[in-house]
Image: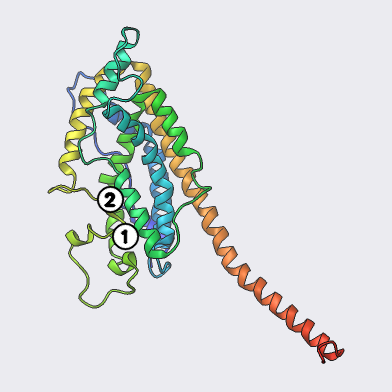
Amino acid sequence: MLSANMASEQQLPLPSPAPSPPLKPEARPSISAEINKETRKHHTELNRLIIDRLPLGLPPQAETAHVLGQGIATFARIFFGFESVWQEIEDGKHRLSKYDPQKAHEYDVVSSLAFLRPFGLARTERLRKDLATISQRTGSYVTTKSAGKGIETRIREQVNERPWLLVAYAWVMYMAIFSGGRWIRQQLAQAGPGFWTGTGHDAIGEKSSDTKKLEIPGLTFLSFDSEQDGEEMKAEFKSRLAETEVLLTDEERQEVIAAAKGLFDDCIGLVHELDVIVAKKKIASIILPAVVLTLLLALMSLLYWADRHGLLRI
C-alpha cells in the first residue's frame, strides 16, 4: 500500500487533456490547446487528489470494489449528462437538428457535432454495465445519492441549450480516459481478477496478461473495443475536432473554455464530496458497534438489577 505522500511524489499521468493536433503557424491556437492551457492548474490539483485517494479503494485498504464503485458512479454522472444530449444530436432529435434560416449557424454547428464522435468512443453503456457488475459482486448497489447530486441534470441542460459545449466535455473526459485513465487502469487491474469478480484472492499463477485484464468486468469503461485499444479513435476524434472548431464563433470558443474550467472545478468538488461520504461511513462503522455494545451492557445491567430485586423471579 503506497502512502498518500509516496503516491503524490509519483506524479504519474492521470486524467488530463492530450496534446492538440498541430496547426499552421499563422493559425490561432486550436481550441484543445487553449483548453489545455487554461485548465493546467485545475488538472494538476485533480491529479494530486486522485493519486492520493486511489490506493484507499484497493487492497489491502479495501476488501471489495464497493468504494471504487462509488467513485465511478459519481463521475459517471458527467458522462451520462453530456452523452445523452450527444446521442439525441447523432439521432437527429435535437431541437437544432432541423434547419431554421434564423438559426443557420447553430444548425451548422449541431450538424458537425453529429459526426464529431467516432463510433465506440461513448462510455455510457460500459459505465452502466461496470456499475451493475460491481453492485452484483459486492452485494450492495454502488451509488452516491449526495455526491454529484444534480450534476447530471445540470450538464444535460447546459449542453442541450448550447450544444457546442460538448467540445469541452468531450475533450476533457475522453482525453482523460486516454491519458491518465491508462495509468488508473493499470492500478485497478493489479488488484487481481478476484477483487473485481468477488472470488477472493487470486491463486498463484492466476495473474493474467494485460489483454485479459482489460476484459475484467467492472473496469471496462477504461478500455476500448478496437485493435489499438482506442488509439485510432483518439486520432480520428482530434481530426474531426479540428474541422468542427472552425465553425465556432469567438464567443462560443470562450464558452467552451469556460465550461472546461468549470468541469475541472466540478470534478475537484466531487472528490471532496466523496471524502465526506467515506469519512461518515468510517465513523458510522465505528460508532454503530459501540452503540450496540452500549445497549447490550445497559440491557445486562437492567437484567442484573431486576434479578437482584426479585423482578425476574416466578
Query: Where's residue 56, x and y in %?
Result: 43, 62
> In the drawing, does residue 156 fall left or right of residue 283?
left
Residue 297 seen in render: yes
User: What is the CA distance from the residue labelled 1 to the residue labelled 2?
Assistant: 10 Å
Total numbered circles: 2
Q: Residue at x 15, y 47 (%)?
A: 226
> In the drawing, does residue 183 fall left or right of residue 258?
left
Residue that numbered label 1 is attached to: 188
Closer to the camera, 3 or 126?
A: 126
Q: Residue at x 38, y 32 (%)?
A: 260
Label at residue 222: 2
Closer to the camera, 270 or 110?
A: 110
- Quadrant where the N terminus is found in the figure: bottom left
Query: Where's residue 170, x and y in %?
Result: 31, 35
Closer to the camera, 307 or 45?
A: 307
Query: Where's residue 305, x and y in %?
Result: 82, 86
Closer to the camera, 220 or 40?
A: 220
Q: Secondary structure at mark 1?
A: helix
Q: Quadrant of residue 130?
A: bottom left
Give amino acid for label 2: Leu
Q: Residue at x 26, y 29 (%)?
A: 90
Q: Residue at x 19, y 61 (%)?
A: 212
- Quadrant where the C terminus is found in the figure: bottom right
The answer to whether the residue labelled 1 contacts the one labelled 2, judged by CB atoms less than 8 Å apart, is: yes
Give amino acid for label 1: Leu
Residue 167 seen in render: no
Looking at this rendering, what residue extends furthest in the front direction?
A: 314
Q: Is residue 289 above or below residue 159?
A: below
Q: Secondary structure at mark 2?
A: helix
